[in-house]
Amino acid sequence: MAVNLLDFDLDALTAWCEAQGEKRFRAVQLFRWVHQKGAADFEAMSDLAKSLRSSLAGQAEVRALPVLSEQQSADGTVKWLFGVGAGNAVETVFIPEEDRGTLCVSSQAGCAVGCRFCSTGHQGFSRNLTTAEIVAQLWHAEHRLRARRALPPGERAVDNVVMMGMGEPLQNYTALVPALRVFLDDHGYGLSRRRVTVSTSGVVPMIDRLREDCPVALAVSLHAPDDALRESLVPLNRKYPLAELLAACQRYLERAPRDFITFEYCMLDGVNDSVEHAHALVRLAGGRGPRGEAWPRVPCKFNLIPFNPFPASGLSRSPRDRVQAFASVLQAAGIVTTVRKTRGDDIDAACGQLAGEVQDRTQAFERLARRRVLPIARDPAEATAVAEPALEGRA
Ligand code: SAH
Ligand code: SF4
């Protein structure tokens, strides 16, 4: 099959062009056509020699993802559902704000981490996306939005990318890093390192590798101030407990483009949202564990996310005044804290509502049932009947 040029960062494209006997600068021209102009047809690449254009046509292509649906919310949020084959689909969300346009990009079909409050996690895991499938989400959104809004050349629609769609980006590291490089490259999308954010549930060794290979802004999904509670929400905490995670955050900041980590905290009614939890977070931010033990001190900001409910979770959203009281405790301690506005919830595009379509290969239903998040069905036929609406996970 022809190679997909969306799979290459500029170094890889240069190596590929050289292997075809082409000069290095041809790779830059080609890369700019693909990413800056959104071209997919080699014949349109007018400054490339005719001979190169025809040899490209035989061996390479710009293979975008098929769009299964596009929905626009009343608040301007746009959600695309892209097919990635074998019955799997992933979602990408564009969130327009006054001063910027943010694209929320998926990294996997499903997710193997299985957080209790996340609809993607409840669907189980099918597979990692390729670099091309990650890049294709920005490629499509950027060029489609530019055309629709008739933006002048040089003006971009997306200037902020957050890896906060479906999947755990640091469990798909080898495909993620070249994609981030395409986002950052001045010949690609030219995004600032401060405006590309990887969000992780805490894959400690990969936080260290990202610091070396491609430091961008880091968001860590914290959700709890102590290990026992965090384990019940984010199973990965058993492998990488809080003190280790905070140490990795501290090391990351040595090379990060920002001087703080963003801690995301999903507000779950009666679970992690009391004033006591907020005080424990203040201690954590000050380098103290739940029993007053010394923990790595991490300069941080908090982003409180009102939980977006879906039926199978059995959880509900914290009331607004509880979120406010919680935020006030953090703010009074001098910690910058924002409450995320829920955007696009009328089209199920809000955080944690991204469900796509996932052909689970990990028996997510059985895993969640074992952890008693879902009712345990004795009869397999009954299990399927309960699993279907549960795994669909729509609010
Ligand atoms: N896997 C990564 C990135 C994708 S999830 C991570 O966990 O960080 C992006 C963010 O959405 C995370 O902070 C996650 O905790 C949050 N989230 C997941 N489900 C949610 C829900 N139902 N309501 C609100 N936020 C949710
Ligand atoms: Fe995976 Fe993130 Fe959802 Fe947890 S919150 S299941 S890590 S996508």
Image: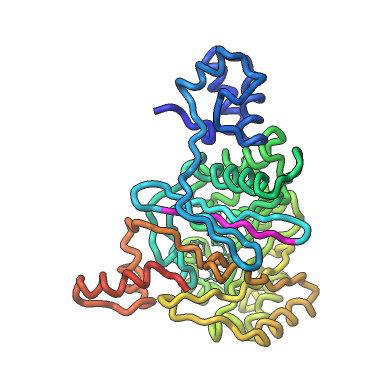
What is the basis of the colouring in this image? Answer: rainbow
Helix, strand or loop for the magenta stretch, by majority? strand
Viewer-proximal residue among 334 and 66? 66
Query: Is any part of residue 51 visible from this angle?
Result: yes
The image shows residue 119 at horizontal and vertical percentages of: 46, 68
Tally the marks.
Answer: 0
The image shows residue 37 at horizontal and vertical percentages of: 66, 35
Q: Is residue 178 magenta?
A: no
Relative placement, left or right, of 198 versus 116 is: right
Query: Is any part of residue 275 visible from this angle?
Result: no
At a point 70% along the width and 55% down the height, the residue shown is: 101
Q: Is residue 362 above or below residue 22?
A: below
Q: Is residue 18 above or below residue 323?
A: above
The image shows residue 20 at horizontal and vertical percentages of: 52, 15
User: Could you tell me which quadrant the N terminus lies in?
Assistant: top left
Please identify the quarter of the rendering in which residue 269 is found: bottom right
At a point 74% along the width and 63% down the height, the residue shown is: 299
Q: Is residue 25 above or below residue 288?
A: above
Q: Is residue 94 magenta?
A: yes
Viewer-proximal residue among 95 and 121? 95
Relative placement, left or right, of 114 versus 322 is: left
The image shows residue 362 at horizontal and vertical percentages of: 33, 59
What residue range appears in magenta? Answer: 89-97
Viewer-proximal residue among 87 and 373? 87
Q: Is residue 43 above or below residue 93?
A: above
At a point 67% along the width and 75% down the height, the residue shown is: 281
Relative placement, left or right, of 274 versus 65 is: right
